Amino acid sequence: GKRVLDMGTGSGILALLAARLGADKVLATDSNPNAVANATLNVERLSLSNVVEVRGPADLFDAVQGETFDTILFNAPWIQGEPQTLYDTANYDPGYRVLDAFLQGAPAHLAPGGAILLQYSDVSQRKGENSMVHLKESIAANGLWIAEERSIARVGRVLGTRERVFRFEIRRDGDQGNE
């Protein structure tokens, strides 16, 4: 029964899952035109276009101006370094530009009582780049707080190194999540 935004949807898997789990409306966006085409095709193949709408290509919140959501999903790029290909933009975030812009824009698109579910890896932290410290400072600097933190250890598919992948539930200051 919720309105969900799947930011950086890629293939659309999280948007499709949200629809299957009962979301009323799901908007899926991505800056990569190939991802937008792929997600659109997957929505059509699964006959979920009555619930899932794919928009883009668009940067972050450009495709959802003035709209709010109960849940915002974002698998943020977490590797420090310059992307070399269009695909790399999903994984590399030089200077935390994408992460910071997302956290700055998200509060305006979060409905009262809503939550951001952010996936992020510590791979750059392990390389000495303080990415986890930066993430938590940026969350706080944008009037947000971490309501829940979960993680799993794995071998990363991009760099092939061990990493811990976190799923953060993030809420706005003053919002204790009472729905």
Image (cartoon, rainbow, N blue to C red):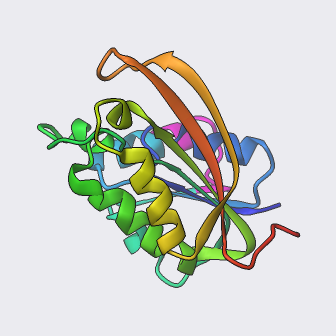
Q: Which corner quadrant of the image does residue 122 belong to?
A: top left
Seen as rendered, the residue at the extreme bottom is 66
What is the span of residues highlighted in magenta in the rendered image?
41-52
Residue in view at x 55 percent, y 20 percent? 153
Residue 124 visible: yes
Give whichever of 15, 149 is nearer the camera: 149
Q: Which corner quadrant of the image does residue 57 belong to?
A: bottom left
Quarter of the rendering occupied by the C terminus: bottom right
Quarter of the rendering occupied by the N terminus: bottom right
Q: Is residue 60 magenta?
A: no
Residue in view at x 71 percent, y 48 percent? 19
Relative to 1, residue 124 above or below: above
Give whichever of 69, 37 is nearer the camera: 69
Q: Which corner quadrant of the image does residue 63 belong to?
A: bottom left
Q: Is residue 48 magenta?
A: yes
Give x and y (percent) for residue 65. Answer: 46, 80
